[in-house]
Each structure stands twice: as C-alpha cells, then as structure tokens.
Amino acid sequence: MAAAAVLVSIAALLPIGFILWAAIQAGWSTSLDLILRPRVAELLLNTVSLVVCTVPLCGVLSIALAWLTERSDLPGARAWLALIVAPLAVPAFVQGYAWVTLFPAMHGLAAAVLVSVIAYVPFLYLPIAATLRRLDPALEDIAGSLGQTPWRVFRKIVLPQLRLALCGGGLLIGLHLLAEYGLFVLIRFDTFTTAIIDQYRSTYNGPAASMLAGVLATCCLGLLGIDAAMRGTRRFARLGSGAARIAPRFVLGRLRTPALLLCAALVAISLGVPLMTLGRWLVKAGAGVWRFDEITSAFGQTLYLAVAGGIAAIIAATPMSWLSVRAPGPLQRTLEACNYITGALPGVVIALALVSITVGLPIYQSAITVVFAYVLLFLPRAMLSLRASIAQVPLELEHAASSLGRSPARVLWAVTARLAAPGASSGAALVALGIMTELPATQMLAPNGTYTLATAFWAYSSEIDYASAAPYALIMILMSIPLTWLLYIHSHHMAGR
C-alpha cells in the first residue's frame, strides 16, 4: 500500500515538476523576463482583484442567508435553503452564458465579480449553514444573560465559531476562481487561466505558457498558505456533547420583508436568469436546435469519460485512503499533502504539463491522458469519500479474516472493499459529476473528434450560436442536479452529528 501510495503521489507531482523543469530549460534569466512582463503584472492584478472582491462578498452574503434560514423565523426557511443551494447545479460558465446573452455589453471586473458571486455563494453558504445548525446555543444564552446585545453576541460568540467554515468555503471559492475559464472568457475578463489557453492556442509558446502556469500555481499555493494561517490553532471543539436542543429563532418583525426580498432576489438572479435564458433560446430556436445525433454522441462520450475517470480516481485513491486510516504517520501525511496540493491546481496547469510531457508518446491526445488528468484533478474528492468509508470498517473484521488464513490482499478485497463500497461509489459519482462539466483540460487533452457536453456547448458559444448551445447547457444542469442533492443531504447529515 505504501509503495502504491508513493507512486500515485509521484504522479500527482508531475505538473509542479514540469513547471520547475520548464523554468530550468528556459534558463533563469529568460524565465524571469517572462514572469516580470507587464502582461503578467496585469493578469496578477486582475486575479487578485477578482479574489479579493468576490470572496468577502460571498462571505457576507452567505452569513446573512445562513442566519436567516437557520436562526430566524423566516417564512419557508427550508424551501429557501434548497433554492439557495440549487444554483450549484448550474455550471459557472453556463451562468456567464446566460448573463452575456441577456446583457451583451457585460464585461470587466465588475461583471466578473457579479456573476462569480452568483455562481459560488452556495459553496460558502452550505458549510456556514451546517455550522450554525449544530452550534450549542448555551454559549449565546450565557452571553445574553451577562447583558450582551444580540449583535455583540453574534460578533463575539457565533462569528468566531464560523471561522473554519468561512476559511474552507472561501478557499474553495478562491481555487474555483483561479481555475475558471469559460465564465471569464464570456465576460471578457482576462485571468491567468484564459491567458494560458490563449498563449497555448495562438502561438504554442511553451516557455511563456509554462511561466504563466507557474505563477498561477504559486497563487494556488499562496491561497492554501493563507487558509492555513487564518485557521490558526484555536480549539473549536469541547468535551461533552452539551444539551441537545435547537437554538431559538430570532423574530424578524419589520425585517421580515427585506429578508424575503433578499432571498427572492438571489434566487431570481442565480436560478431565474439561466433558466429563463435557456428557455427563451430553446423556444426561439424550436425543435431544429435539438440535433439528436450530435447530442447523443456528446452525451455518450461525456458518460464514458466520466465513468472511466470516476473508477480510475477511486483505484488511485485506495492506497492513500487505506494508509490514512490504518497506518497514519508522517509519511502518510506528506504523501496525502502532495495529492491535495495537485488537486488544488487549475485544470489548465495540469493539462499544459501533460501536453508537454506526452508529446511524441503514443498516449498523446488519447483517452488515457484525459483520464489521467481527471484523476489528478479530482483525486481529493475520491480520497475524502473513500477514507470516511474505510474508517467505518471495523478493524476486528480484518483481523478475524487474517486469522482464518486469508492473505492481506484477499482481506482487503473480501472485507474492506465490500464494506467500503458505498463510500467508493459515492466518491466515484462525485468525480464523475465533476468531469461532466470540466472544460479546459478536456479541450487541451482530448483526442481529435472528442466532444463532451461541455466542449460542444463551448464550441457553439464561441461562435455566438447561443441557441445551439442551449440544449447542452440544459443537459449539463440536469446531470448536475444529483450532485447538488448529494451535497444538500451531506450537509444536513454532518450538521446532525
């Protein structure tokens, strides 16, 4: 298991190793010249501005919405909760498509921040709402009995306990912003991801694209470092389960109407706009836009790659997941960190590395390379689900099987694998659903003639044929609904613990 985990971790480090190798090959002076170009400074300013503006806005909005649905007497709170989470089923580049087709003049930082907030608020809302749901109200009662106002109680007692949820959700949004391609191309806002793909397609300038990828990877590692520093070492748990009771609901009074308007406005712009846009294009184009031969082919290829990537990711995640449960230690933590760091890199960085590594090899622009890229991108998703499932397998059952003469491999297959199968299938489903809407890596690595739902949608959108792109967007939304439901159920399950 350790040997297999080492091999997977070495493979996961290939993108970062390629960036360093490209810098060495180009020479440090050339690399510095490429990195210190005015264009790189412009892209860095755009990227930092996007993250700095979007993440705090998502945080403030998520806290307000979570407090309204979890701690106030907002009418229909459970329905609003589901509606606020529902936009997760709409890929970010589909949100961009919807807004650009309605307002063609939308572009620049303001437009990018607006659509990004709409698309990514649920990523912060879910962990914050789950945390609020399971907080013990006793601490708030004590602070209130000492004369603290409700606002001071929230600021001094509740808000500090939301730190981990805010950091985790903020990191996830930040990494998505660094990796997103389609949304920012449609909004006409340049980021490192859009610049790398433009550089790769227009001039195939390997050193220039690699140095841009290196800066982008550094930004990702910087976000991970900021997240670790903000989490700190404070203790957020206590001994004892406390009193199992529900926190009292705050009576909104005159604030009820503004609260309802806030929830309704968010749902209208995050769900209403894309659905209305898709419906308008589908009705306007008529039945002729449903090219069933093309749609069936794109759906089949998407399903094939998603299933292959999901199974491959689970197989690659098994050694590390088993070690993290059965043999934790410094080596295991180091290897696991390698996989998480690579999983945090944008798809375009991994794709650029694999394109350069496989040029001249038989696997260049083949399904094998595409699936390998998917494994590197989504390995953390598979590891999280599989690790939790393996942890629920009693060690005594493995010992009993060994005492009956079973070899370690047979014990793993007959006992551990079978009992961990539900978690493995859940992890494979999460990876598969992520693959279905993946765009940059698929565009750069897929064999000629490969059209997934995402790439077919993008091909028509790039030609300003929005009507022909609408069916693909609708199918992607329908296929993403199970993931949204899974996240919704998972958040309730975790909050109930």
Image (tube, helix red, strand yellow):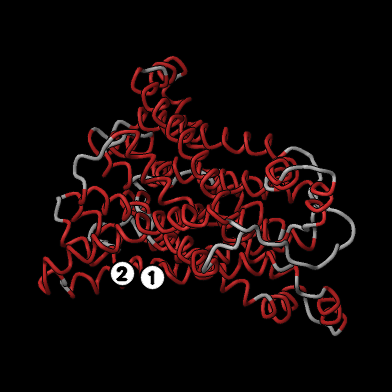
Q: Which residue is mark 2?
A: 475
Q: Which residue is at the front of the view, 373 or 452?
A: 452
Picture coordinates of residue 445, whole percent (x, y): 34, 52
In the picture, measured across the screen, residue 440 lies left or right of residue 313, that is left
Picture coordinates of residue 113, whole percent (x, y): 39, 39
The C terminus lies in quadrant: bottom right
Asked where in the image residue 241 lies, by quadrant, the reply is bottom right
In the picture, measured across the screen, residue 48 lies left or right of residue 43, that is right
The amino acid type found where label 2 is placed reads Ile
Q: Which residue is at the front of the view, 391 or 476?
A: 476
Q: Which residue is farthest bottom? A: 404
Categorize mark 1 by other alpha carbons within 10 Å: few (<14), some (14-19), many (20+): some
Q: Which residue is at the front of the view, 387 or 264?
A: 264
Label 1 secondary element:
helix
Residue 495 shows in the view: yes
Q: Residue at x 33, y 22 (%)?
A: 39
The amino acid type found where label 1 is placed reads Met
The N terminus lies in quadrant: bottom right
Picture coordinates of residue 368, whole percent (x, y): 41, 60
Label ID, residue 479: 1
Residue 380 shows in the view: no
Categorize mark 2 by other alpha carbons within 10 Å: few (<14), some (14-19), many (20+): some
Callouts 1 and 2 close, C-beta under 8 Å: yes
User: In this rendering, is residue 257 above or below 200?
Assistant: below
Picture coordinates of residue 339, whole percent (x, y): 60, 49
Label ID, residue 122: none
Label 2 secondary element:
helix
CA distance separating discs 1 and 2: 6 Å
User: In this rendering, is residue 25 above or below 89?
Assistant: above
Q: Residue at x 82, y 56 (%)?
A: 138
Q: Residue at x 39, y 16 (%)?
A: 33
